[in-house]
């Protein structure tokens, strides 16, 4: 299953860490890439941007974005809203980004894209992701490839600050892949769906609700724990619906954590995961 950033056309040529390419943003076309572009924010993008602007994520979404649900997979995502005449709301004078240090992953890593495929299962029987990087085909107006500066892929990812974003994005994708594997979109609705949104997109509310401060748990770790708690909820709910994951070649043994009848309360388990008191499975 292909999950992300398919090359628009042409053949797909993966980039190795030391492969070089030429790219240098030019004053002449500065900001053209920020007009009428569809920018999808992952949960980590959203919380970094909101925090940097001194907003909670709900207020950020109200002001600058919209929360949407993919009609096929029911997976929620956030789209950056554009101003009425097209450009991104953060585009400033002379084509500069008003929130450059906070810009989301896709803006950071451009023109490097990432292709992700599900490649069997990992030791826990969960979908394993295999990612490769490639150069996106740039539109004609983008003069970056005509610049003289060259980069290796490693230099580009490091300099743009994309690496941690890609790592967290892979964890988010693995969660989504697990959810799809568990066919969650066939049975996931109502209150669990709200919890889903809550755990992915509302770090501030969760911290407030469960009294977990930034000093107690740092932001990256808290994001990981939220995903872990959500994975626990998904596997529990899937087990209640009769869906389990099976290992490849493991004789069909059940790997999903079936909490039915064993957990005192799934929410207590999730809270324990958030507090780092128990492994989340
Ligand atoms: S967030 Fe910044 S870099 Fe990204 S599209 Fe908007 S203005 Fe451009
Ligand atoms: S070179 Fe391309 S990415 Fe850079 S500012 Fe110009 S249009 Fe945007």
Image: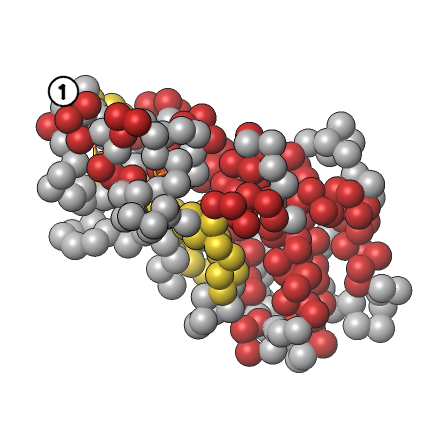
Q: Which residue is mark 1?
A: 148
Position of 106 relative to 188 (above/below): above
Percent coordinates x, y for residue 109 in the rendering? 34, 35
Left or right, 120 with respect to 107, comes to right
Question: Residue 126's x, y, as percent?
Answer: 56, 59
Q: How is the image coloured?
A: secondary structure
Residue 164: x percent and y percent? 49, 33
The image shows residue 190, relative to residue 30, as above or below, that is: below
Q: Is residue 279 above or below residue 213?
A: below
Q: Residue at 66% of width from left, 80% of height from top?
A: 242
Q: Is residue 61 or residue 193 the one in the foreground?
A: 61
Residue 6 lies in quadrant: bottom left
Does residue 195 appear left or right of residue 114 in this picture?
right
Q: Which quadrant, please, contains the C terminus? A: bottom right
**Towards the viewer: 163 or 124:** 163
Front residue of 70 and 177: 70
Q: Is residue 96 left or right of residue 173?
A: left
Which element is circle 1 on? loop
Q: What residue is shown at x 66% (from left), y 64% (from top)?
A: 194
Question: Which one is in front, 210 or 181?
Answer: 210
State the residue at coordinates (30%, 27%): 93
Image quarter where ligand 1 lies = top left
In the rendered image, the residue lying farthest to the front is 84
Position of 42 relative to 117 (above/below): above
Residue 53 visible in image: yes
Q: Say whether residue 236 is left or right of residue 193.
A: right
Name the residue located 84 percent from the left edge and 73 percent from the top edge.
261
In the image, farthest residue toward the top: 149
Q: Residues within 10 Å of mark 1 (few under 14, many from 20)?
A: few
The residue carrying mark 1 has its beta carbon less than 8 Å from ligand 2 = no
Examine the rendering and report whether any part of residue 111 can be seen: no
């Amino acid at each position: 299953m292909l999950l992300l950033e398919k090359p628009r056309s042409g053949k797909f040529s993966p980039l190795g860490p030391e492969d070089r390419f030429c790219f240098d943003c030019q004053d002449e076309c500065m900001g053209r890439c920020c007009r009428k572009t569809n920018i999808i924010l992952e949960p980590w993008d959203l919380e970094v941007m909101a925090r940097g602007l001194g907003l909670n994520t709900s207020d950020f979404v109200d002001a600058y974005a919209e929360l949407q649900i993919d009609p096929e997979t029911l997976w929620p995502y956030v789209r950056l809203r554009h101003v009425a005449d097209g450009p991104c709301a953060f585009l400033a004078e002379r084509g500069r980004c008003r929130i450059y240090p906070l810009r989301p992953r896709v803006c950071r890593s451009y023109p490097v894209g990432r292709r992700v495929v599900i490649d069997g299962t990992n030791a826990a029987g969960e979908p394993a992701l295999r990612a490769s990087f490639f150069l996106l085909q740039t539109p004609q107006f983008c003069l970056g490839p005509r610049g003289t500066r060259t980069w290796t892929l490693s230099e580009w990812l490091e300099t743009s600050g994309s690496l941690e974003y890609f790592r967290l994005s892979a964890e988010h994708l693995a969660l989504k892949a697990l959810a799809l594997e568990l066919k969650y979109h066939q049975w996931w609705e109502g209150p669990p769906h709200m919890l889903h949104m809550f755990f992915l997109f509302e770090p501030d509310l969760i911290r407030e609700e469960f009294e977990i401060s930034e000093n107690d748990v740092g932001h990256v770790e808290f994001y990981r724990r939220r995903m872990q708690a959500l994975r626990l909820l998904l596997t529990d709910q899937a087990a209640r619906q009769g869906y389990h994951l099976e290992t490849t070649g493991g004789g069909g043994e059940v790997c999903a954590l079936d909490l039915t009848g064993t957990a005192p309360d799934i929410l207590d388990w999730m809270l324990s995961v958030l507090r780092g008191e128990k492994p989340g499975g």
